[in-house]
Amino acid sequence: STTEVSTTPGNFEAVGTVSELESQGQILNEDFQNGAISVTRNPEDAQLLYAVNPTCTHKGCLVDWNAGERKYICPCHGSEYSPDGTLLKGPAEENLPPYLVKIEGEQVLVQA
Ligand code: FES
């Protein structure tokens, strides 16, 4: 008998456009397959994007992107995360989950 184990990762899903990212500094899409998704970019390198699930790992509030300080700040109890989801300040104890993200033409795609 043959056992087939699928290692195929999830498909990339379009979550927004490059223009949206450029004009607003963030793509926030709450209809993403695995829950909400937030995409930001490195101001030094427009091709370098970060995608995270912006649901605070403390008690589940949606974190706000602070473009000036280049970090996510939770409006509920003040936890902070870097653009790649790394926890900077509690009370949360876990990072925001990161996702693979890429640009294809005008579309920004995230791997579900
Ligand atoms: Fe985000 Fe508590 S829910 S800090």
Image: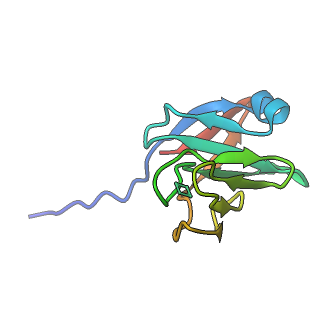
Give the residue displayed 45% in from the left and 41% down from the top.
35
Q: Residue at x 59, y 53 (%)?
A: 100
Q: Residue at the far right: name it.
A: 44
**Quadrant for ligand 1?**
bottom right
- Residue 16 image position (x, y, % from top left): 65, 30
Above or below — where is 14 with respect to 76? above
Residue shown at 77% from the left, 35% from the top: 21
**Residue sitting farthest toward the front:** 77
Residue 37 in percent (x, y) is at 56, 42
* Number of callouts: 0
Which is nearer the eye, 66 or 46? Answer: 66
Front residue of this view, candidates 38 and 90:
90
Question: In screen coordinates, is 92 left or right of 84?
Answer: left
Q: Quadrant of residue 4?
A: bottom left
Q: Decide if residue 46 is on the left or right side of residue 83.
A: right
Which residue extends farthest left?
A: 1
Q: Quadrant of residue 83?
A: bottom right
Q: Nearer the viewer, residue 109 or 87?
A: 87
Q: Quadrant of the N terminus?
A: bottom left
Q: Is residue 2 above or below residue 29?
A: below
